[in-house]
Image (spheres, rainbow, N blue to C red):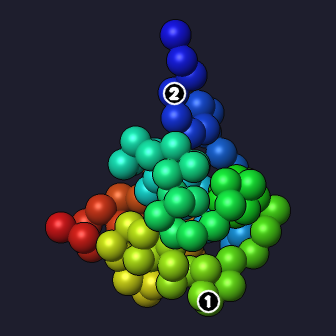
Amino acid sequence: MAKPIGADKERRVRNLDEAFGSVLTDLRTGRHWPQQKLADIAGYDKSYIRQLERGTKSATLRTLSNLASAFSLSVSVLIRANGDTDAENATNDIAQRVR
């Protein structure tokens, strides 16, 4: 049986990069997209998406714009969700905003 897409355990975030990575992972897995699909849609390499999701790279404004576009969201929704260090609350916040 294949491993489910995305992180299979709860994540604790320590900084904004990790918080954004958690939100990005939740958005991607909520759509049942593998990292490669998000990378293709947003125009990045899969390894860069992986680094963003792990919080080891910081997203530029251009990257935020491209990722928001890939999810059909505004950058402001990603930024507001990013300010919430609890990934579940951030994901719920995004879901409420896009309804």
Residue 45 to residue 65: above or below: above
Q: Can residue 6 be seen in this view?
A: yes
Disc number for residue 70 = none
Question: Which quadrant would the C terminus be assigned to in this image?
Answer: bottom left
Q: Is residue 18 visible?
A: no
Quarter of the image where one finds residue 69:
bottom left
Q: Nearer the viewer, residue 49 or 84?
A: 49
**Residue most toward the right?**
56
Residue 20 to residue 28: above or below: below
Q: Which residue is drawn at 63% across and 67% down?
A: 44
Secondary structure beneath disc 2? loop
Quarter of the image where one finds residue 49:
bottom right
Report which residue position mark 2 lands on: 4
Quarter of the image where one finds residue 64:
bottom right
Q: Nearer the viewer, residue 36 or 4?
A: 36
Report which residue position mark 1 lands on: 61
Q: Distance between the residues labelled 2 and 1?
A: 30 Å
Q: How crowded is mark 1: few (under 14 residues within 10 Å), some or many (20 or more)?
A: few
Picture coordinates of residue 90 (x, y %)? Answer: 46, 63
Picture coordinates of residue 52 (x, y %)? Answer: 70, 63
The disc labelled 1 sits on which kind of residue? Leu
Q: Which residue is drawn at 38% across and 67% down?
A: 71
Picture coordinates of residue 40 (x, y %)? Answer: 53, 60
Q: Nearer the viewer, residue 45 or 57?
A: 45
Residue 3 to residue 91: above or below: above
Query: Would residue 25 appear left or right of 72 to someone viewing this image?
Result: right
Picture coordinates of residue 73 (x, y %)? Answer: 35, 76
Q: Of marks 2 and 1, which one's residue comes earlier in the chain?
A: 2
**Residue most toward the left?**
99
Q: Which residue is drawn at 45% across and 84% down?
A: 75
